[in-house]
Image: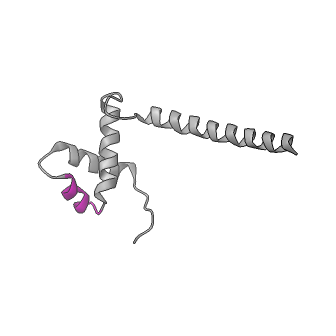
Amino acid sequence: MRGRRQFSDELRARAVGRALEGGVTLAQVARDLDLTPSVLRTWVARARAERDGGRSGLTTAERDELRRQRKELRVARLETRRRTRRSAT
């Protein structure tokens, strides 16, 4: 099993373009570019969401906002837990 790989924006754009233009299956595009079908599927879903303004999934901005809110919630819960433990002792 190989480790986590990094992909350039250029490769992502080329792969998504080939997958969306049709004529070739997503699995074939993934094989041709030495990608896993699941990573290509994720890239295609994100590209479609960006294209249609989020109707088919989260846009990049929405994903970033969700990530930020989840981090805020995690920090708030940690602070609450610390305060509760301090007041209990």
Query: Residue 58 at x, y = what percent?
Result: 40, 34
Q: Nearer the viewer, residue 18 or 65?
A: 65
**Residue plotted at (14% across, 52% down):** 24
Q: In this view, does 20 lie to the left or right of 80?
A: left
Q: In this view, does 87 lie to the left or right of 39?
A: right
Task: Farthest residue to the front: give it.
Answer: 88
- Up the image or down, 52 lies above or below 39; here it is above
Q: Is residue 69 left or right of residue 43?
A: right
- Up the image or down, 28 lies above or below 64; here it is below
User: Which of the image's four quarters has the N terminus?
Assistant: bottom left
State the count of labels. 0
**Residue plotted at (34% across, 47% down):** 42
Colour basis: one colour
By secondary structure, the bulk of the magenta-drawn segment is best described as helix
Q: Quadrant of residue 7?
A: bottom left
Q: Would residue 81 be counted in the magenta stretch?
A: no
Q: Quadrant of residue 78?
A: top right
User: Which region of the structure is painted magenta?
Assistant: 26-34
**Residue plotted at (35% across, 40% down):** 46
Q: Which of 52 and 17 is in front in this view?
A: 52
Query: Residue 39 at x, y = what percent?
Result: 34, 54
Query: Residue 44 at x, y = what percent?
Result: 29, 44
- Up the image or down, 60 lies above or below 53; here it is below
Task: Farthest residue to the left: give it.
Answer: 23
Q: Which of 62 and 76 is in front in this view?
A: 76
Query: Residue 14 at x, y = what percent?
Result: 28, 49
Task: Farthest residue to the right: give it.
Answer: 89
**Residue plotted at (22% across, 61% down):** 32
